[in-house]
Amino acid sequence: MTALSVVHQDHSLVAVDHSLVIGQEFPDVETCRRMLKDIAIALHFELRIVKSDRSRFIAKCSKEGCPWRVHVAKCPGVPTFSIRTLHGEHTCEGVRNLHHQQATVGWVARSVEARVRDNPRYKPKEILQDIREQHGVAVSYMQAWRGKERSLAALHGTLEDGYRLLPAYCEQIRKSNPGSIALVYATGQENCFHRLFISYRASIYGFLYACRPLLELDRAHLKGKYLGTLLCASAVDADDMLFPLAFAIVDTESDDNWMWFVTELRKLFGVNTDKMPMLTILSDRHQGIVQAVEYNFPNASHGFCLRHVSESFRDEFKNSKLVNLFWNAVYALTTAEFESIVNEMMEVQDVRPWFQHFPPNLWAVTYFEGVRYGHFTLGITEVLYNWALDGHELPIVQMMEHIRNQLTSWFNDRRLIGLSMTSVLVPSAEKHISEASADSLCYQVLRANKVEFEIVSTERTNIVDIQSRSCSCRRWQIYGIPCAHAAAALLSCGEDVRLYAQECFSVQKYREAYSQTIYPIPDRNLWKVSTEGMESGSGKSDIIVRPPKTRRPPGRPKKKVLRMESLKRPKRVVQCVMLIR
């Protein structure tokens, strides 16, 4: 029996040989069964199994009167099976519709395994469409969904295995990346999963010695079988790229779990007290986050993510003019400018009651006590969303490995980028300096003394102090990079403007942030079962972590669409007027 069928693989045509010959061997009876099922589907006939045991496999065409039949038997003295007799011709019409008895969940799982390995987001709807196009077979949505679940379990183990392996996984992180923090906690008499915290030493070192003292706190809800919430604390590197510092998975988002997560962050800094920075923390100021930050970092400046605040303002007032004025108020550099904008808003509608719920000192640049370095929204939100989307159907260990692999890739790529940089500052800072220097040509500079300068323009006069690195416009202090007024003062006395940016914008700091390595984790077959470093609500140490009690409700989970707004302020046109004195 010889036949060829054509299937699509990675959008190209591949010929698959479905030949059977007498004497053909198979390594075991299961391989034989699978191949015969594949042939039946490819050639559109249904298989009926006559006999199947440890020593033989006999099958025939299910259509009455059709002579197609195959007899496979075990070879003596070896584990292989071979075809003994074969009637390879069909006299029947075969399957006339798209449904096929051999297209079982197991067959679907085998068919999509390679695709699922490459793309965990492969959807059941896409699976059933691809199977219909490639194999001419119709499967149900539930078959596709179960096939994917079985394929994921074959590739990565079951979801339950993931929880059971957590203690050993944490131990492997600590062994392969000394100085890293990896802790798992169970709770209750059944030792159900409660919390997992991971922070790699490479990230800890990079944040404490090279990143800006700025942290973003956010979370993403997981939609998998056992639900849960992914928490993350992320810094920002010298070139404005996200620098994830620590992440956790908890059974549910709660005030207690936020307190625990932020407390673990504080402990992480506690072993490096000499490098403890004066932090600025950004979040949506969820009640649990606010309480945790106030308790663990009482001296930190904790500001709002502007996406959260702007959505609240827009939903409250539903007025485009007010929304535009709101953004002008956000970016106002002085209290006088802020109050002037608020007065304009009051002419449209009374906004003071809203200000009571969202005090300006938590979102307005002019009143905020911390340094945002130009970061007004949580950049980590979209990263967390994608991590949750990629990993919610994977076992928890595989999800953590997915995150570690991405961190490793980022560290490697950015380490190479840092080595290729030849300037004093990172590209984003060099661009700001270049723009400030160009704008400075419009100003007249009057030097008051060695360090103070009066910068005159048609709009206003600003005072620059190059020793305290400040300007009366406050942009230098707020963003950490010399403003156009400062650039004018520095250039007038022959100084290199770049040397007056904060050190956290230097190429040296960028390189140092990625100077450490996130090392790989050995294959799980090499792990030793250990519960060292694990705690449980029952106080036992020799326990097996079981899945949490929370379960996903029936039905398809709702999709959350991230609303990404443009948060850039329109550039103000600078008019150059020559002043002659």
Image: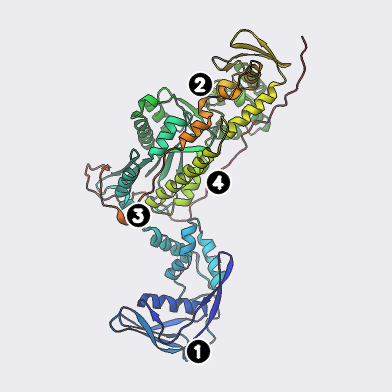
Tell me which numbered mark, 2 or 1, is placed earlier along the sequence: 1
Residue drawn at x 47%, y 68% is: 111
On the image, numbered disc 1 is attached to which residue? 89
Contact between labelled residues 2 and 3, with CB atoms less than 8 Å apart: no
Contact between labelled residues 4 and 1, with CB atoms less than 8 Å apart: no
Q: Is residue 321 above or below residue 48?
A: above
* Residue 188: mark: none
On the image, numbered disc 3 is attached to which residue? 523
Name the secondary structure under disc 3: loop
Residue mark closest to the camera, 3 vs 1: 3
Quadrant housing the C terminus: top right
Q: Is residue 157 above or below residue 247?
A: below
- Which three-letter amino acid code belongs to the residue tagged 3? Asp
Contact between labelled residues 3 and 4, with CB atoms less than 8 Å apart: no
Residue mark closest to the camera, 4 vs 2: 2
On the image, numbered disc 2 is attached to which residue? 369
Using the numbered discs, state the Cα–Cα distance from disc 3 to disc 1 in whole angstroms.
48 Å
- Which three-letter amino acid code belongs to the residue tagged 4? Val
Is residue 216 at all visible to an observer of this figure?
no
Name the secondary structure under disc 2: loop
Q: Quadrant of residue 279?
A: top left
Tell me which numbered mark, 4 or 2, is placed earlier along the sequence: 2
On the image, numbered disc 4 is attached to which residue? 561
